[in-house]
Amino acid sequence: MVAPFHTGAAKILPGLLPRARQALCSQLPLRFLEGYSSIVNRKLASHGFGASMAAMSSFPPQRYHYFLVLDFEATCDKPQIHPQEIIEFPILKLNGRTMEIESTFHMYVQPVVHPQLTPFCTELTGIIQGMVDGQPNLQQVLERVDEWMAKEGLLDPSVKSIFVTCGDWDLKVMLPGQCQYLGLPVADYFKQWINLKKAYSFAMGSWPKNGLLDMNKGLNLQHIGRPHSGIDDCKNIANIMKTLAHRGFIFKQTSKPF
């Protein structure tokens, strides 16, 4: 009587387990899911369901083909200067299936309203005057972003991609604010994004008050590079996303439609 039961269960479980796990992952904190998964894996092992255990350990598919990780650095001082201007514009193209980085866009931007960086800004970001002098202005950089998006196939209507930022500031405040000041249009692909802080709080059940530092600590990850370096912050965001995805979290848009 044991053999027929074993065969039938083996046929059903590979199909059911990933869907069941995907449904659970979208609703429950990861700490609960990890404990649950461990219990299920031990039960499956005791019954010899090796293939089903492999299905459980592979992370569920994401809703997007690509995640575009973005983190601006901008002119700043104490008290804050106005208007702020983007001086570093990095994007990492993250494959939604493997969660690996496939391509990088990275440019420094010449500020035009306040062309001289403050000592505070250089100390915070590590960006010195020589890194922005003679660089393209924001309009030119946005044109190059569009060219990169086209080259990477991200403008194809059949390809689903979305930006990911650590907070809402980059795409809700900084880019639209500077574009409005300069009279530049904002491309539609910048108008929806995932706030990693919100995604992390959904997954882990706690709000990362100190941003990337708290998220790395909560996931036992080593911080990559220098804090407030745009490209290094992007690498940290990508690493956190990969870790959450491998634990079963499915990323969803957090911004409201414009």
Image: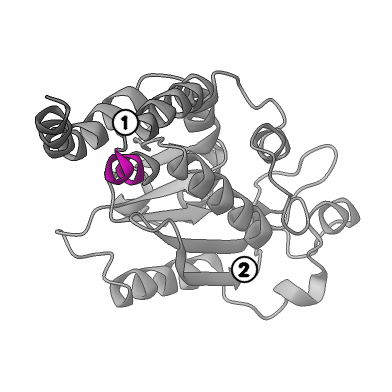
Q: Is residue 244 visible?
A: yes
Residue 104 screen position, x and y as percent: 50, 71
Is residue 78 shown above or below 179?
above
| Of the two numbered discs 2 and 1 in the rendering, the one whose residue sits closer to the viewer | 1
Residue type at mark 1: give it.
His
Residue type at mark 2: give it.
Val
- Badge 1 local density, few (<14 within 10 Å), some, or many (20+)? few
Q: Which image quadrant for residue 31? A: top right
Secondary structure beneath dot 2 equals loop
Q: Residue at x 17, y 32 (%)?
A: 6
* Residue 54 on the magenta span: yes
The overriding secondary structure of the stretch rendered in magenta is helix
Which region of the structure is painted magenta? 49-55
Q: Residue at x 46, y 46 (%)?
A: 164
Is residue 84 shown above or below 209?
below
- The disc label shown at residue 47, or none: 1
Is residue 59 shown above or below 121?
above
Secondary structure beneath dot 1 equals loop
Q: How is the image coloured?
A: one colour
- N-terminal of the two: label 2 or label 1? 1
